[in-house]
Amino acid sequence: MAKTKQEKLDLKAEKQYYKTHKKKQKLTVGDVIFNILNYAFFGIFTISCIFPFYYLFINTISDNSLVRIGAINFIPKGIHFQNYLSLLNAGEILDAFLVSASRTVIGTALMVVVSALAGYLMTKQEMWHRKIWYRFLVITMYFNAGLVPTYLNFLMLGLTENYLVYIIPAIVQPYNIILVKTYIESIPAELEESAFIDGASHMKIFRNIIWPLSKPILATIAIFGAVGHWNSFMDSILYMSGTPELQTLQHRLYIYLNQTTSLANIMQGGVSSSQAASAMASVMDAKTIKYTISMVTVIPILAVYPFMQRYFEKGIMLGAVKG
Amino acid sequence: MKKKKVQGNGWTDKVYYVTRFGTILGLMMMFFPAANPGYVCNLINKNLSLFTTAISYDSLTTQAMRPLDKGWVDKSSFIMLMVAAAIVCLGILLGAVAGCMSVGNLKLKRISNWFGLAGSVVMGGGMVIMYKAYEKFGGSSRPDKVYNILPNGMYIFTALAVVLVVANIVIILFQPRPEKGEQCEIKTPMKLFLMFVPIIAFVFVFSYLPLWGWRYAFFDYKAGETLTMDKFVGFKWFTFLFQNEATRGDIMRVLKNTLIMSGLGIATSWVPMAFAIFLTEIRCGWFRRIVQTFTTIPNFISWVLVYAIAFAIFSTEGFVNNFLTDITGTAHTTNYLLGESGTWFKMLAWGMWKGTGWSAIIYISGISGIDQQLYEAATVDGAGRFQKMWHITVPGLIPTFCVLLLMSVANILSNGMDQYLVFENAKNAVDIEVLDLYVYKIGIGKGLVPLSTVVGMVKTLVSVTLLFLANGVSKAIRGESIM
């Protein structure tokens, strides 16, 4: 995607900053010590952020018997991917994965469409009592009825033990609506006006003008929404305690991390059809299973992160502008 | 007979307020179990709303398995009830469509009238079928097991249906005719509003309706019961919090944990700023990029995964123990996660590990927004690295820092529960329990609905007050609102 004007300006400012700071070429002893300490600190902190993922990963692909005795610390040995295969063959994990993935896709898509439309409508001054509805929406960001009243509300609506509890309450997000509204207000009004004079309806203007032009902000809220959906586990813990087949992957992981005994049963339950697979499954001990599920849970985030970093960073800036 | 044309829409417009209000009332009652007209016998779940009655046969019959097996009640009675509920819901929905159309011009209004009439008639018909179902339950072979109940909802919905039928007939009879050739249309403000109505409904149901649950704070309520006025206890639970020895002790401990952990968070809130300042001191571009990329990753993984990582690194069989064993040659098997001491600081450390890189981004872009001439001038004047940092960069970032600080002060009671829930274990349970986690435990775990509602309620009120205070401070100091 092409960089926007603002981003180009940002980049320019950044370059300018380093240019002016580079002028001083002579390094004193103090500078050298400072640099060494500075690089060392950031180096260590960065490693502390990335090493745990690496450690988990090499432990899931190394020989399970070596993992069990704790011999895999830095370098993987006896690489194999059987752990992942056995885990995906175990129905429970695959179910949880599908629940998480589907809620991420459906929930995010609905949230983005609704936020876009609502944000657009909120920019329309001529809407009947727009100000009242806008406040009605904004106020909800500052109070929260609390855990138990919310729970009882969902119980009353029949949303507990129901897949829809992942999707429906998260569709309308006032914060995102405000972000979209602010963004749309920055689009030149002439575009819309000329289309309106040509006889386009509001829906048509929204579809053909507003939607394409507000794609950057929509991408940003989509990314944040998707990460939120994928990472969410409190809703699963609260509302799905009685329906294991609808629990999210994060919830499953939480359960397994706190479980030590019956883990092997999962594997056997899943792959009992084949003797060989069953034998393989018994090789996996609790630790390997925990590590592998952690990896399965974190891989989607790590996989999309490099491509989305731009949007993530934009997201926090949007919040800042609002705040 | 041709009626006289009148200017405007005449007095029948006022009658629309009756139909619209009635329909909104019906729509809301569709979701209130207390107003369910389908609660015609004790075999039906009390917490079932009309809407659920209409769509879910399974929830309708959860309490009736045995009577169904024994043949005390007939399966057809339940099906009849369900069909009746569905018809009533359909009627209300037709009414809602009519209500939406009735904000248009005269032509559209006249069409809407027929929808409205049809809806109210359908609703009335549904109520008749529901009454038949009620009689059918009454005809059970075991009246001692199947108590027949004529619920309030039955009266309410019947009355509503009658009122709507009458109002619609009145409108149809007395509404002036539209001019010939008039096109169906809705004026723009109303059209925009109608498009926004679904969002209002969503916000109402998921953000405002839970406030209705605050009433549990004033009742002697146990999970699963129904609320009746004789269980009203006023402010009993509010005073109970402070009078009951054990509860008071819990609250004090939990509040202490909450304030300490939030306080530690606030006391270290300068760290991301320092992180950003020192990171920009690094000249090597690719190194800076890598640091920035990798240190923000932890922010995007859930607390469960953070715990999984903690488990992999610090548990008995984790990396630290393996590594120490390798180096020293003697077996190390300490489970660092089970430590009793320093829980607050460990939680702080995990919070910082997860959040620092991310929070620094805002300061990094703040730094690139500082006027470069300031630095040049300072260099000419002979300022050193640290002097420039302290006298130019830091003051440039202070406004952002203040906003974030005020926000975190306003959120001092809400430090979330995810982190503490996942890291909790038998050893650190005393020190890790924060307010949110406490509410979860007594409310969901122990089923003490009123008490947890009271705590949640007080927390919300205090938070909102703090937010307004913080906003006031911000306005006074910076002349800008943080909301």
Image (tube, coloured by chain):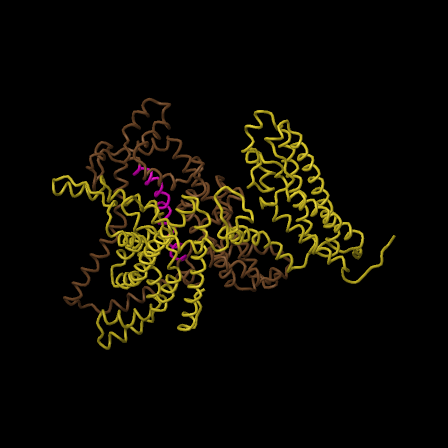
Residue A7 at x, y = what percent? 40, 61
Q: Residue at x 52, y 52 (%)?
A: B215
Q: Secondary structure of the magenta portion, mostly? A: helix
Query: In the image, is residue B64 above or below residue B343?
Result: above
In the rendered structure, the answer to whether residue A12 lies left or right of residue A124 reads left
Residue B142 at x, y = what percent? 62, 28
Residue A177 at x, y = what percent? 50, 56
Quick one: which residue is furthest to the right in this view? B1
In the rendered structure, the answer to whether residue A225 lies left or right of residue A205 reads left
- Examine the rendering and report whether any part of residue A321 can be seen: no
Which chain is in brown here? A
**Residue B321 colored in magenta in the image:** no
Which is nearer the eye, B60 or B34? B34
Which is nearer the eye, A246 or A62? A246
Which chain is in yellow here? B
Q: In which quarter of the image is the C terminus of chain A?
A: bottom left
Q: Residue at x 20, y 41 (%)?
A: A73
Residue range corresponding to the magenta coloring:
A290-315
